[in-house]
Image: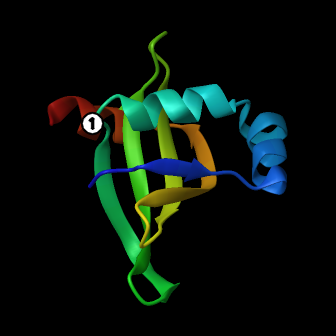
Amino acid sequence: MKVTGIIWLRSVVEKLLWKHSVTTDEVEEVLSRSPRYRFIEPGDVEGEHLYAALGQTAVGRYLIVFFIYKATGEALIVSARDMTKNEKRSHAKK
């Protein structure tokens, strides 16, 4: 999977900051540093599905980023948060 761009919605950016303390820069770092992608569920629009990207920021923070992969190759960010212990363990094994 190749993410060619990121689509941000103001409401999502605000939620990431107040609820999860995740910045847009951190999300962009994860997506640019060869994350592991996981299919989550089919989307409502043909060919646009929900995925998760698991990765690490430059300072070592482990994040999981949920996004809709658009037909254009862009990622519409839905949410992002710190990985759980189980997600970190699974990510480290691969």
The reply to whether residue 18 is visible in this rendering is: yes
Residue 17 drawn at (x, y percent):
79, 35
Residue 52 drawn at (x, y percent):
42, 54
41 left or right of 21 in image: left
Of residue 68 and residue 63, the one placed in the foreground of this image is: 68
Q: Quadrant of the C terminus?
A: top left
90 left or right of 54 in image: left
Residue 47 drawn at (x, y percent):
38, 82
Taking the view exactly as shown, the residue that stands out farthest to the left is 94
Of residue 32 and residue 4, the one placed in the foreground of this image is: 4
Residue 14 drawn at (x, y percent):
84, 44
Q: Residue at x 74, y 42 (%)?
A: 16
Q: Residue at x 35, y 33 (%)?
A: 88
Q: Crowding near pointer 1: few (<14 within 10 Å), some, many (20+)?
A: some
Q: Residue at x 39, y 32 (%)?
A: 32
Helix or strand or loop: what does disc 1 sit on? helix
Q: Quadrant of residue 36?
A: top left
- Kind of residue sitting beneath label 1: His
Of residue 36 and residue 28, the one placed in the foreground of this image is: 28
Taking the view exactly as shown, the residue that stands out farthest to the top is 59
Q: Quadrant of the N terminus?
A: bottom left
The way the protein has been coloured in the rendering is rainbow
Q: Is residue 11 above or below residue 82?
A: below
Q: Which residue is mark 1?
A: 91
The reply to whether residue 85 is visible in this rendering is: no
Q: Residue at x 45, y 13 (%)?
A: 58
